[in-house]
Image (cartoon, helix red, strand yellow):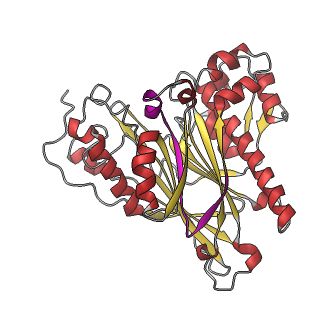
């Protein structure tokens, strides 16, 4: 089979904007957009891994500029990136985005702590950026699944052997809305201007043979999000006004390496998962999970975040488009009880891939093997 691209091709058509809810114009609003994007680490973008791609489109100088062009085009208020190397963060993403009015935080995968320069600088991680005219940073936190597995092992050798040995991470940033983020008709009260949004970004373990690891990592992340919500709620209430748990908004982004029929998606989107779920594969996790999550209810582990996915395969059939694997594995989850998803960007039309025999990405016009997922949200006062 010839896996090479067509010798000539046109740029893909503009991705369509797909409304999912009506704008509430009766109350003061904060409308913001979110992008999550696995940008493909330079260390992974090799001809051996992507033999179907022209070498020139794997070169970081080319891909980096194409990535930044895409980021600039969509001009989102919050950007969550995965597979960012520290070299790329320090010398490319951060300075470029700072010049466009963003600030950011970054964390590497856990194995970086065991490495010396210069290898450490090639370890990828997660980054969160936000527009400083709409948000200010309250606090941020690295979530190391490896360290949490060690804390919560509860005499489970499976927790140590399977979860502890993976170095995936999550990154949390608590953002506070600014006055400039709000429309003032009708007039927004000062007490409602500063609303808190917990933004979480993660990249879960990749291997399909380890669905148990991914599910436990997602549980670890929800536990840390819940803890962060409680901490900022109490801190905020002490100084200004009383906040309920449900007053704090949550946006959870990432490459979850999980399909919509997975334990990860079921747990995050429904708020519960049975301890007998087949993706635990019979390993001895029950005590560790119950201790970690603070108990169980009728044989199920639950969380109170009320998360929904902003996008679905009906809208976005693929977020990962590589030769031999095409599926939706990247998501934006949001707390649907206190914010509204107004719309999402749809996919590059399949006809373009077919017309130019694009069997997988990266491509000269598509700089990663993933597509960005982009959604717009409304907060009301």
The residue sitting at the left extreme is 7
As drawn, 323 above or below 366: above
x, y percentage for residue 70? 36, 56
As drawn, 122 above or below 23: above
x, y percentage for residue 94? 46, 53
x, y percentage for residue 141? 66, 45
Task: Residue 247: name its quadrant.
Answer: bottom right
Residue 381 seen:
no
Q: Give the magenta-colored segment's residue range.
A: 118-139
Residue at the spot x=63%, y=25% of the render? 212
Residue at the spot x=28%, y=45% of the render? 61
Residue at the spot x=77%, y=28% of the render? 289
x, y percentage for residue 337? 72, 59
As drawn, 185 above or below 357: below
Q: Quadrant of the C terminus?
A: bottom right
Judging depth in this view, the residue of 198 and 315 nearest the camera is 198
Viewed as shown, does residue 149 lie left or right of 45? Answer: right
Judging depth in this view, the residue of 353 and 198 nearest the camera is 198
């Amino acid at each position: 089979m010839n896996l090479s691209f067509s010798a000539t091709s046109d740029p893909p058509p503009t991705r369509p904007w797909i409304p999912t809810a009506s704008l509430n114009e009766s109350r003061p609003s904060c409308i913001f957009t979110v992008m999550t994007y696995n940008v493909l680490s330079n260390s992974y973008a090799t001809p051996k891994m992507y033999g179907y791609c022209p070498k020139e489109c794997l070169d970081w100088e080319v891909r980096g500029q194409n990535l930044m062009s895409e980021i600039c085009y969509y001009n989102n208020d919050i950007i969550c990136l995965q597979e960012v190397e520290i070299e790329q963060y320090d010398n490319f993403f951060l300075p470029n985005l700072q010049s466009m009015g963003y600030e950011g935080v970054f964390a590497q995968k856990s194995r970086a702590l065991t490495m010396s320069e210069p290898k450490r600088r090639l370890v990828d991680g997660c980054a969160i950026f936000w527009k400083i005219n709409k948000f200010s940073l309250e606090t941020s936190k690295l979530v190391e699944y490896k360290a949490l597995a060690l804390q919560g092992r509860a005499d489970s050798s499976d927790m140590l052997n399977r979860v502890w040995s993976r170095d995936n991470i999550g990154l949390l940033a608590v953002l506070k809305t600014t006055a400039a983020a709000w429309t003032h008709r009708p007039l927004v009260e000062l007490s409602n201007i500063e609303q808190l949004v917990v933004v979480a970004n993660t990249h879960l373990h990749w291997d399909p043979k380890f669905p148990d690891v991914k599910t436990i990592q997602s549980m670890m992340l929800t536990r840390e999000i819940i803890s962060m919500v409680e901490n900022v709620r109490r801190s905020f209430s002490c100084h200004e006004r009383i906040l309920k748990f449900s007053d704090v908004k949550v946006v959870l982004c990432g490459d979850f390496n999980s399909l919509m029929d997975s334990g990860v998606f079921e747990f995050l989107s429904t708020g519960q998962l049975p301890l007998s779920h087949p993706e635990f594969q019979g390993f001895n996790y029950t005590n560790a999970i119950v201790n970690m999550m603070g108990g169980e209810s009728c044989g199920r582990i639950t969380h109170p975040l009320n998360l929904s996915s902003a996008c679905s395969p009906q809208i976005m059939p693929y977020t990962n488009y590589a030769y031999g694997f095409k599926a939706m594995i990247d998501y934006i989850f949001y707390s649907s009880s206190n914010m509204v998803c107004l719309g999402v960007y749809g996919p590059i039309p399949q006809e373009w891939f077919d017309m130019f025999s694009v069997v997988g990405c990266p491509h000269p016009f598509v700089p990663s093997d993933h597509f960005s997922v982009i959604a717009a949200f409304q907060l009301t006062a």
